[in-house]
C-alpha cells in the first residue's frame, strides 16, 4: 500500500470527463497515438498515449474518457502531451482498459 | 484551471478498481451510505459516501467502481471512512455518476 495522502493533496489532482475528437498514430513510435480530447475548455487538450496495443483508432474515436487535466505538459517522442487518459491496467500490462462514467456526461464534468 | 502538478505528485494518489460488497444506510444521516468495497486486499475497505440521492442500494450492490484507496482515514458522522468512490459530478450536484472501467476488471487493478 502506498503512503496515505491528505484530502487536500488529492484535490490538487484535476480530473475531468473528456470526449475523444481525433486519433492519429504517432509517426515515430509504434505504440503511441496522438489524441485530441474535448475536456470542456476553449480548446481540446492533446495527449500522447501508449494505447495502440489495446484499442484501434475506431474504438477510441468519440469515446468518453477520464482525463487527468492539470499535469505539467511534457513531450513524448517529440510530441506535446498535456494530459493523460486514465486506465485500469494489470501489472503485467496485458490489459489496459479506459475508464468512463456509468452514463454519458458532458465533457469537462469534474471528477470528485 | 488548477495549478499544474508533476507526474510524481499524481503517482502518490493510489486509485484501484473496486467491487461493492455491502451497502447500508447510515443510521444518523439521510444522504449517506456506509459501503464495503473489495479493492483486492486482505479485507474490504469501508467508505461513507453521500450517494443516497443518486443511487439505490440495489444499484450499488455488486457495482464495479473506481476507488481512491490511500486517503488518510477519517470519520463521517461517527463512521470510519477509509477510501472514496470517484464520480463525475456536475457543479450544481444535480448529477453524480460513478466511474467504471469500460469492461470488467478484477478488484485491485491499479488505475494508471
Image (cartoon, coloured by chain):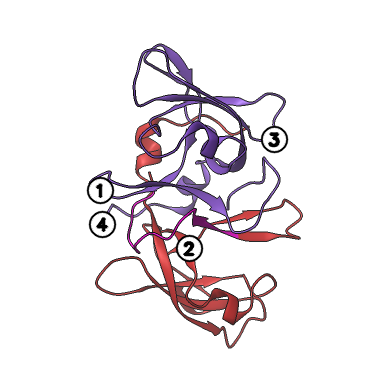
Chain colours: A purple, B red
**Is label 1 on the same chain as label 3?**
yes
Q: Quote the CA–CA distance across marks 4 and 2.
A: 19 Å
Q: Residue at x 60, y 85 (%)?
A: B28
Q: Is residue A15 above or below residue B68?
A: above
Residue topped by disc 1: A91
User: Residue B13 shows which numbered tag?
Assistant: none
The residue sitting at 28% across, 52% down in the picture is A2
Query: Cα distance, mark 3 to mark 4?
Result: 34 Å
Query: Could you say which is closer to the camera, residue A8 or residue B37?
Result: B37
Q: Quick check: A29 left or right of A11?
A: left
Mark 4, residue position: A1
As drawn, the label of residue B65 is 2
* Alpha-carbon span between mark 1 and mark 3: 32 Å
Q: Which residue is mark 3?
A: A40
Q: Earlier in the sequence, mark 1 or mark 4?
A: 4
Answer whether labels 1 and 3 touch (C-beta < 8 Å). no
Drawn side of residue A70 relative to residue B10, left or right:
right
> For the residue carrying disc 3, how many other residues have a C-alpha within 10 Å: few (<14), some (14-19), or many (20+)?
some
Instruction: State which region is magenta.
Output: B98-111
Say if mark 3 contacts mark 2, CB within 8 Å.
no
Amino acid at each position: 500500500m502506498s503512503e496515505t495522502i491528505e484530502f487536500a493533496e488529492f484535490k490538487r489532482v484535476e480530473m475531468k470527463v473528456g470526449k475523444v475528437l481525433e486519433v492519429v498514430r504517432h509517426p515515430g513510435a509504434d505504440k503511441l497515438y496522438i489524441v485530441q480530447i474535448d475536456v470542456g475548455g476553449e480548446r481540446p487538450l492533446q495527449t500522447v498515449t501508449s494505447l495502440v496495443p489495446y484499442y484501434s483508432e475506431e474504438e477510441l474515436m468519440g469515446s468518453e474518457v477520464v482525463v487527468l487535466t492539470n499535469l505539467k505538459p511534457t513531450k513524448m517522442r517529440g510530441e506535446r502531451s498535456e494530459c493523460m487518459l486514465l486506465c485500469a491496467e494489470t501489472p503485467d500490462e496485458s490489459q489496459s482498459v479506459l475508464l468512463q462514467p456509468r452514463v454519458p456526461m458532458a465533457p469537462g464534468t469534474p471528477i470528485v
